[in-house]
Amino acid sequence: MIHIRPQDKVFVLTGSGVSAESGIPTFRGVGGLWRNYRIEEVASPDAWAQDPALVWDFYSMRRSVAARAKPNPAHLALADLEKRLADRLFLCTQNVDNLHEQAGSRHVLHMHGELFKSRCDTCRRSPFPDDSSYEGPAQIPRCQCGGKIRPHICWFGEVPYELDRIFAALRHCTVFAAVGTSGVVEPAASFVAQVRGRARTYYVGPEEPVNASDFDQCFQAKAGKILPTLFALA
Ligand code: NAD
């Protein structure tokens, strides 16, 4: 159990494992491959430059999987935690699905973007809601400026979003909990090392992450099983 005191500020980092029980596979869960492509090869600026139709095929598939998914008890527990802690909770997700929002979380920082948004690859038009599928080269949507519309996703090799807000929250947190993230993808994998020694640090997931030694305690179980009873507020 994680005891939260009245003065605590809690930073929760979620990864793809939190959505696994909702039927959205983790990258490791599918062997890191899609149609025999390594996922890094279809989720990168180079892939977009060389074959945008292939990239949209991949994200259209991911949209259709995510559109069928429903939040699981882990998402619901974190939405409930927000109700109890209000702005003492900072929820940062590496996930691009919207299951935290579907569960009722109102303040979610999507550091790797959002699957159901798109943006122009050329102009500074803001990202906009988009749940369409674009399959085949003829279907690549165009912006009024002439640029191509791309998924609003932080690809491998790009800089995650809103790092200033994330680092500010890391500086202030006294409790850090990572859920369902293997500790491989940077910079999220290093967040725990930044707060270690100053904040109490916890991990939740069925396997030890590669950065397990940075956590004070690892709860080795599925997120949906453990999160509903994990946090005790003083
Ligand atoms: P990862 O695939 O590297 O690791 C997933 C982790 O989840 C593993 O450590 C695994 O043990 C754990 N896990 C599996 N089932 C779990 C469960 N029921 N409860 C808790 N943990 C469970 O994923 P990552 O560390 O998030 O990093 C990879 C990247 O994949 C991220 O950038 C993320 O954006 C992206 N991604 C997102 C989604 C999504 O939006 N749902 C899906 C796949 C990948």
Image: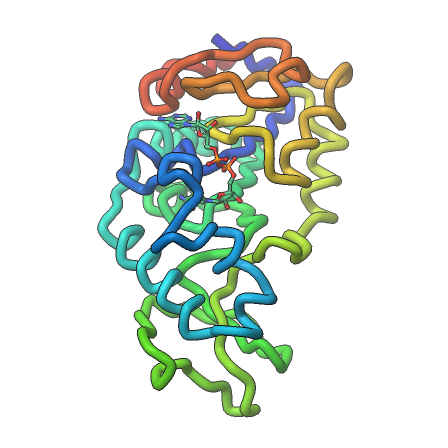
Residue 21: quadrant of the picture:
top left
Rendering quadrant holding ligand 1: top left
Above or below 114: residue 52 = below
Q: Can you give x and y, in whole percent of width and height, for residue 130 in the image?
A: 38, 69
**Res 161 visible:** no
Residue 47: quadrant of the picture:
bottom right
Extreme residue toward the front, this view: 36
**Res 63 visible:** yes
Q: How is the image coloured?
A: rainbow
Q: Residue at x 33, y 24 (%)?
A: 224
Q: Could you tell whether 91 is left or right of 61 in the image?
A: right
Q: Can you give x and y, in whole percent of width and height, for residue 200 in the image?
A: 66, 14
Above or below 78: residue 203 = above
Above or below 49: residue 18 = above
Q: Residue at x 36, y 28 (%)?
A: 74
Q: Can you give x and y, in whole percent of width and height, for residue 225 in the image?
A: 32, 18
Q: Nearer the viewer, residue 234 or 75?
A: 75
Q: Residue at x 74, y 40 (%)?
A: 168
Q: Nearer the viewer, residue 193 or 173?
A: 193
Q: Could you tell whether 77 is left or right of 185 in the image?
A: left
Extreme residue toward the left, this view: 68
Q: Residue at x 43, y 36 (%)?
A: 28
